[in-house]
Image: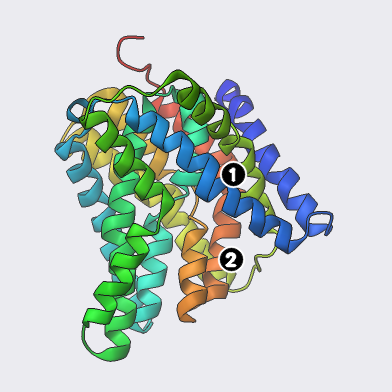
Amino acid sequence: MLEVFLKTLPFFMLIGVGYVAAATKFFSDSAAAALTRFVFYFALSSMLFRFSANLSFGEVFDPKFMGVYLWATGFVYLIVQAVSFWRAVPVEEAAVEAQCGVIGNIGFLGIPMLALLMGEEAVAYIMMMLAVDLLVFGSLIVILITGSRDGRVSWRTLRTIGRGLVSNPMLVAIFLGFLWSALELPIPMPVNEFLALLGAAATPGALFAIGASLASKSAERLSVAGWLSFVKLVLHPAAIALAALVIWPLEPYAAAVMIASAALPTAGNIFIVAQHYGVAPQRVSATILVSTAISVLTVSLVIAWVAVAPPGS
């Protein structure tokens, strides 16, 4: 456990550096926003494209893996929804709370951290989970919010979802990478090295950006934030472990990556959605802040528990 904690600590230290830089105003809000755009549209997308383009889609695509993740995540999603309705929370707020409970920071934090701690083989599995999060749950929150307001799901809602999906650089990078792989096109050496160089900026850039964004988050409604953080850091990985190890057993390494990814704190992009629609942004903000702070310890515990060497290593 101590060894794993010491390995994960530098990642959270880098988040801390970003937090201090932004909290002291040494790094302005506009600078943090620019860094986030650079990581989102360039560095992380380059990393994802390079990984997926150098993989065989037939070997990576695993319907059972995605099905297990979808089932377990959907189960926890419904639990959070049920608790929200029991608290007499409106549908749109319940949708945001459920999103906080099951959508982790597997893009900005999971890909760079788990690739280094668990091996680059983890990235293929993380990309499948990222696709489920974006395609299924990313669409679901928009449907529930707009549907509860309009009383129905309109073509405008579907257009909004479609526009959001095709403009998401991570999803586009994964799709284009697998398309490149399926066409069996070699990546020219200068291009591959360019992508590797640009993608290398994803890890420090993403972690610093996470910290900088946390500096602007408030800690209001801590009781709800505490519950949602418990769901994200404990209940979600527990449900994933039950599904991936007991109900529908997966290959040990695949299960380990899925459980470790589920243990990551609440994703920052949920705040963007909540703020855009004006639905409980302070609640989301507090959940991101609390779950990220607690995950310094919980992520290390989970990774130490599921530590499995990649196949063939």
Q: Amino acid at mark 1?
A: Ala
**The C terminus lies in which quarter of the figure?**
top left
Identify the residue under disc 2: 286
- Compared across the picture, whether 89 is left or right of 249 comes to right
Label 1 element class:
helix
Depth check, front residue: 138 or 55: 55
Q: Quadrant of the N terminus?
A: top right
Nearer-N-terminus badge (2/1):
1
Q: Residue at x 28, y 50 (%)?
A: 132
7 relative to 32, above or below: above
Q: Give the residue at mark 1.
A: 206
Report how far apart the C-alphas of labels 2 and 1 lie in the structure. Answer: 20 Å
Mark 1 closeness class: few <14, some 14–19, many ≥20 residues within 10 Å: many
Q: Quadrant of residue 15?
A: top right
Question: Residue drawn 69% across and 56% down?
Answer: 32
Q: Nearer the viewer, mark 2 or mark 1?
A: 1
Q: Position of residue 183 (x, y in %)?
A: 21, 30
Side of 121 where 23 appears, left or right = right
Q: Secondary structure at mark 2?
A: helix
Labels 2 and 1 touching (C-beta < 8 A): no
Residue type, label 2: Ala
